[in-house]
Image (cartoon, rainbow, N blue to C red):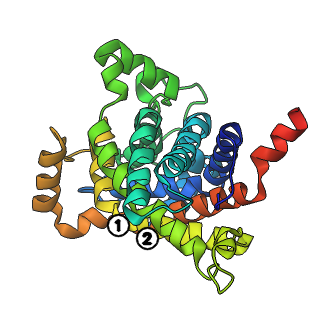
Amino acid sequence: MGEKKVSLPAKLINGGVAGLVGVTCVFPIDLAKTRLQNQQGIQVYKGMLDCLAKTVKSEGYFGCYRGAAVNLTLVTPEKAIKLAANDIFRQKLSKDGHLPLWGEVLAGCGAGTCQVVVTTPMEMLKIQLQDAGRLAAQRPVPAPAQAAAPGPAPSLVAPPPQARSTPPPRTSATGITVELLKTRGLAGLYRGAGATLMRDVPFSMIYFPLFANLNALGRESAGGQAAVQDQAPFWQSFLAGCSAGSVAAVAVTPLDVIKTRLQTLQKGEGEDTYRGIIDCTRRIMTREGPSAFLKGATCRALVIAPLFGIAQGVYFLGVGETVLELLG
């Protein structure tokens, strides 16, 4: 992203490419984060690695990518809006090429607010698909009808339908969307929008100013203003994106836990349902203690750090500008 002037179409392409590459790389960790955050009573998973190992064992390798199609479809507009909006706000708030800290925070706030339009339905659908495996793991496995008892050899004829254990139908993003629109209207897809806003606005207010300042380190020298405008090297942009992303991700993890719980439609046995943000916060604090608000913090940092490192790398390489040149 840097300080260079980039056209809006190039920003949109850069944001979209960064989102697609980043999500593909880190989605399994994001799945583990969702499942860990939703655990209340029965502890199916002991941690991130245990969650991933059990997911692969029970659902196969591609089980780690449940819900990825939703993310890959919607992450392009989501990341494009977030990164492009921040750049636009920064340009509008800058005076003579200088942007004060309050301007950086305000630009981040605007970017986080704009992205919620796409983020909320995307996360709503993704969470249902990601959590389906955890809910299935909680269900008791029915005992075989014939448990090695002495007697005649078992029949080769298939047992009647009621004797077979039929797995629950596999959920799909389309099915969930249709059901929500049918039963709750468009508002159903925007369940948890307030919590999403509470998470994404502070995240952007922390991330973008922190990234801009880390990316500018060492560039101001005795050469004066010209040195400040020089583009940071690739490794600096990448590391600045990773560092700022991980700090912002951990800082807003409590808000992410609340958002995940509110947006989860199906609950496991004995798990709470919530009436809103305040009720969710109170119940988590009462039943699980303060540490529950940091569930999935490590996973979240491991997801967000490379995601934004890749995003800044794509901006640095000028992928969008190259695509536009080829198309032109």
* Kind of residue at disc 1: Ala
Question: Above or below — where is 199 with respect to 164?
Answer: below
Residues at marks 1 and 2 touching, judged by CB atoms closer than 8 Å: yes
Q: Residue at x 37, y 27 (%)?
A: 189
Q: What residue type is labelled 2?
A: Val
Q: What is the number of the mark on residue 5? A: none
Q: Label 1: state its secondary structure.
A: helix
Image point 58% across, 66% down: which residue? Answer: 241
Q: Can residue 49 be seen in this view?
A: no
Mark 1 vs mark 2, CA separation in Å: 6 Å
Which residue is outermost to the top? Answer: 182
Question: In which quarter of the view is residue 295 placed?
Answer: bottom left
Judge left or right: residue 199 versus residue 92.
left
Where residue 297 appears, as percent x and y from the top left, is: 39, 66
- 138 vs 321, nearest the viewer: 321
Q: Name the residue under label 1.
A: 251
Relative height, residue 60 to residue 80 (above, below): below
Residue in the picture at 44% in, 17% down:
178
Quarter of the image with the N terminus is bottom right
Query: Which residue occupies the foreground of this view, 54 or 278?
Result: 278
129 displayed left or right of 319: left
Q: Is residue 303 visible?
A: yes
Tell me the residue at 46%/51% (across/down).
Answer: 93
The percent position of residue 132, horizontal first and vertical second, equals 43, 41
Of all residues, the one furthest to the bottom in this rendering is 222
Residue 95 percent across, percent down from the top left: 50, 56
Label 2: which residue?
247
| x then y, percent, for residue 152 | 52, 38
| Residue 136 falls in image quadrant | top left
